[in-house]
Image (tube, grey):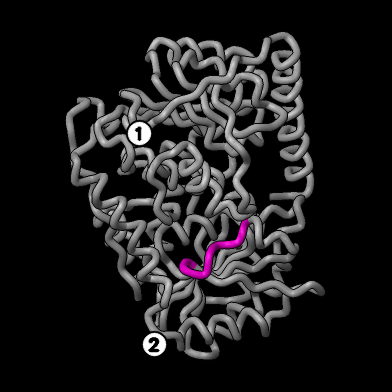
Amino acid sequence: MTVAGETKKAFRYRLDRATRGCVMRVMNWLTPAAPEQRADFRQTEIQRILLVRSLFRMGDSILATAAIVLFRKNFPAARIDFVGPRISKTLFRNLPIDHHYEAARSFPKVCWSYLALLKRIRKAKYDLAVDVSGSSAALGSFIVGFSAARFRVGLKGQWDRWFNIRLVRPSSLNKYSALPELVRSMGLESPTVYPTLILSSGEIAAAGRRLQALITGDAGPVLGVFVGGRKARGKRWAKENFLELARRLRAEGMQPIVFIGPEESDLLGYFSEALGASVPVILEPDVRAFAALVANCKFFIGCDSGPVHLACALRVRTIAIFLQANFDHWGPPPELGRVVFHPHGVPVDLVVDACRDELQAPLYAGVNNVAAFDHVLSSASSLKHRTSSPSGEFATMPAPELRRF
C-alpha cells in the first residue's frame, strides 16, 4: 500500500471510529443505567446466548474463540450466536456457533445497519447476552445492552450502564487469559483454554500441495514469516530485517516462506526480487486459504499482529516479535509460542537464535497444557451441537487436522 493509500485508510479508520464513538456517547448520555441483577448461571435455564465482540481486527476475532468454546462447554444444548465483523464469520467456520451477525464498520453504513441488527437480535429473545470485547468498545456494550436479553453481562467500566450484570475486570492483563477469567467470574466452569480455529482436511491438504509446488531443491523445515504489522502503531519490523532473517534461515538449511498481507501488498515486489526462487513469497488475501498455508508450517514468525494469533489458534508454534513493551498484554503464552523483545530494538540475531532454539527443543512442553483446550473442544463437538448451516440440522464439528513439513 502506498503512503497516500495508508494515509487515506488511516483517515477513514479515524472517521469511522469517531462516528461510532460520538453516537455511543450520545446514547450513553440519553439512556438510564440498567438496575443490577443477580443470577446463578449454573442453576438458571439458559436456552439462547448471544456473544458480542465488536472489535474489527483479525486478532481480536481470533481471541474471542475461547469464549465460544467455553460457553458451548457450559451450555451444550443452547443456541449460541455471535456478533462480530465479517472476517470472524469466515474464521469461525466449523466452530460451535449457530448463527453469525455481521457488525458493520464503515460510515455511513453504521448509521442504519445497527437499527436493523438490533431488530433481528431482539426478535430472537435471548436469555443471556455477553460482551466478550472486554467492554473496551462502546459498540459491544451498546449491542448487549439493547439486545433485550434477560441477562446482559459485561465488565464494569465506562460503558457498563447498559448491562444488568456488571463483572469485576480480570486481574490478568494478558488477552489470552482474560476471557476464561471473565467466564469464571460468572460462576461457570472455565478450564485453561486458548483460541482455536478449525480447518478441514481438504483445506490443509490443498495448501500443503501448493507449498510443495513452490519449494525448490532440498528443503528443510518450513517456517512461515509474516512481514506485516500495524505500521501506524509502530508494530512492524523493518523490511530489511525480515529480508536478512529470511536469507539467514535459508542459509542454515531451513525453508522460510514469506507471507505478505493485503495491507503490505506494496512489499511483494521487494521481497520477490530480493529473495528469488529459493524463498517463496506469498500474498494470499483469502483468510482461510492463508490459515491453511500457515497450518502446514513447522512454526511461524511475525510481529505482534493478527496472523501471530492465527498461528497460535492453529497450534503452530509461534515466535512473536514485539517492538514495544506490551507483550504482557498481547503476547502468546509459552504453551503456544515465545516472545522476542529488546528495549533498544529487536536485532535479527535474536530472532535467528529463537528459531534455532525452537527447532532444537523437544516436542514442546506446552503441548500437554494445550491438549486440555482441545479436550474441551472435542467434548463440545461430541454433543452434536447445532451448526449455522442453512438446513439447521445437527452436525458434528470436524476435528482439527494439521500437517507439518
From the viewer's perspective, is 386 left or right of 288? left
Q: Secondary structure at mark 1?
A: loop
Query: Is residue 272 something that shows in the picture?
Result: no
Q: Amino acid at mark 1?
A: Arg
Q: Secondary structure at mark 2?
A: loop
For residue 163, above or below residue 295: above
Mark 1 or 2: the one toward you: 1
Instruction: Provide the major secondary structure of the magenta segment.
Output: loop
Query: Percent x, y for residue 314?
Result: 40, 59
| Lower position in the chain sequence, tag 1 or tag 2 | 1
Q: 403 or 312, which lies in front?
A: 312
Residue 71 quadrant: top left
For residue 11, above or below residue 346: above
Q: Which residues are magenta?
A: 330-336
Q: Amino acid at mark 2?
A: Asp
Neighbor class of circle 2 (other Cα within 10 Å; few <14, some 14-19, many 20+) is few
Query: Percent x, y for residue 295?
Result: 38, 63
From the viewer's perspective, is 259 left or right of 245? left
Q: 173 or 167, which lies in front?
A: 167
Residue at the right extreme, as displayed: 344
Q: Which residue is painted at 50% across and 32% down in the image? A: 84
Pointer 1 residue: 42
Residue 99 quadrant: top left
Q: 22 or 144, which lies in front?
A: 144
From the viewer's perspective, is 361 left or right of 321? left
Pointer 2 residue: 218
Query: Percent x, y for residue 351?
Result: 63, 79
For residue 173, above or below residue 256: above
Query: Is residue 401 something that shows in the picture?
Result: yes
